[in-house]
């Protein structure tokens, strides 16, 4: 399948699979068509990056991974985000998470931009702590449903939104968040959801609103009381609610 974006129509043409004809989709239709669902295997794309060409699944290996997309090089919000991410690299490494960024410019542009990012973030040391994917053709932005139809670049083409994809060691999508091009991400929140995903991967709990690592958790409502008693030796408390239903059970983080 091939695709192309045109300034004149602000739409994409995807080659038909049956009659070898082109059908034109609107940006919104295309984003819906391409949207990845939680639990889907993340595409195993090949891409040029600031550390050379990668095959995505091989690059992930047995780790968790996060792909952060960015609208463009040498732009203010993106520079603050990549700088913040560079300074948080050790926090992701502690959690066994590989990080990779994407921007719709070529590798040589990324390499020059990295110097600005390091300067802004006061990030010292040789090199750069994570790779940046070159997507100047916008092929990945299209295939991963990462276009923001409301924000356009100087040529009138849609910008890549600020997407966050968290991928498990099984290469399946575990979490996705889409921010508009005008809104920078909160990286403390991203670390928080990584902690939650990794905890709930192996423990029969869910994490409540505003939870942080070490905080109390909720016993899964699917667990019967005898199972919960066996799994949570520290015990759990049941919140009394007007409905009388004992579904809100709180336990220390296992």
Image: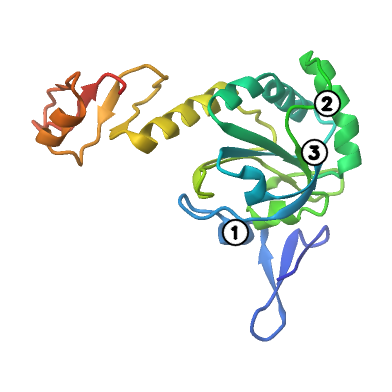
**Helix, strand or loop under label 3:** loop
N-terminal-most mark, 3 or 2: 3
Quadrant of the image occupied by residue 126: top right
**Helix, strand or loop under label 1:** helix
Disc 1: CA contacts within 10 A as few (<14), some (14-19) or many (>=20): some
Image location (x, y in percent) of residue 125: 81, 17
Question: For mark 2, what is the residue?
Answer: 127
Residue 146 visible (yes or no): no
Circle number at residue 72: 3
Q: Are marks 2 and 1 in contact (CB under 8 Å)?
A: no
The answer to whether residue 237 is left or right of residue 159 is: left
Q: Are marks 1 and 3 in contact (CB under 8 Å)?
A: no
Q: Is residue 179 above or below residue 145?
A: above
Point 69% across, 37% down: residue: 100
Residue 229 visible (yes or no): yes
Question: For mark 1, what is the residue?
Answer: 34
Q: CA distance from mark 2 to mark 1?
A: 34 Å
Point 78% across, 62% down: residue: 9
Report the quarter where the C terminus lies. Answer: top left
Q: CA distance from mark 3 to mark 2?
A: 21 Å
Rendered image coloring scheme: rainbow
């Amino acid at each position: 399948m091939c695709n192309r974006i045109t300034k004149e129509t602000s739409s994409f043409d995807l080659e038909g699979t049956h009659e070898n004809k082109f059908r034109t989709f609107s940006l919104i239709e295309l984003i819906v068509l391409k949207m990845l669902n939680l639990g889907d295997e993340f595409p195993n794309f090949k891409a040029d990056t600031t550390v050379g060409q990668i095959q995505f699944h091989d690059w992930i290996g047995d780790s968790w991974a996060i792909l952060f997309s960015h609208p463009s090089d040498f732009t203010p919000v993106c520079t603050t985000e990549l700088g913040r991410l560079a300074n948080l690299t050790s926090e992701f490494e502690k959690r066994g998470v590989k990080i990779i960024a994407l921007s719709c410019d070529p590798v040589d542009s990324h390499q020059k931009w990295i110097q600005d990012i390091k300067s802004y973030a006061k990030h010292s040391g040789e090199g750069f702590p994570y790779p940046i994917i070159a997507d100047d053709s916008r092929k990945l932005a299209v295939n991963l449903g990462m276009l923001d139809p409301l924000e356009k670049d100087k040529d009138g083409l849609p910008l890549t939104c600020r997407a966050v994809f968290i991928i498990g060691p099984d290469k399946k999508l575990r979490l996705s968040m889409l921010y508009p091009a005008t809104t920078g991400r909160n990286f403390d929140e991203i670390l928080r959801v990584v902690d939650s995903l990794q905890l709930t991967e192996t423990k029969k709990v869910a994490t409540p609103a505003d939870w942080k690592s070490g905080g109390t958790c909720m016993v899964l409502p699917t667990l019967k009381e005898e199972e919960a008693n066996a799994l949570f030796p520290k015990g759990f408390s049941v919140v009394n609610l007007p409905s009388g239903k004992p579904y809100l059970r709180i336990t220390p983080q296992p």
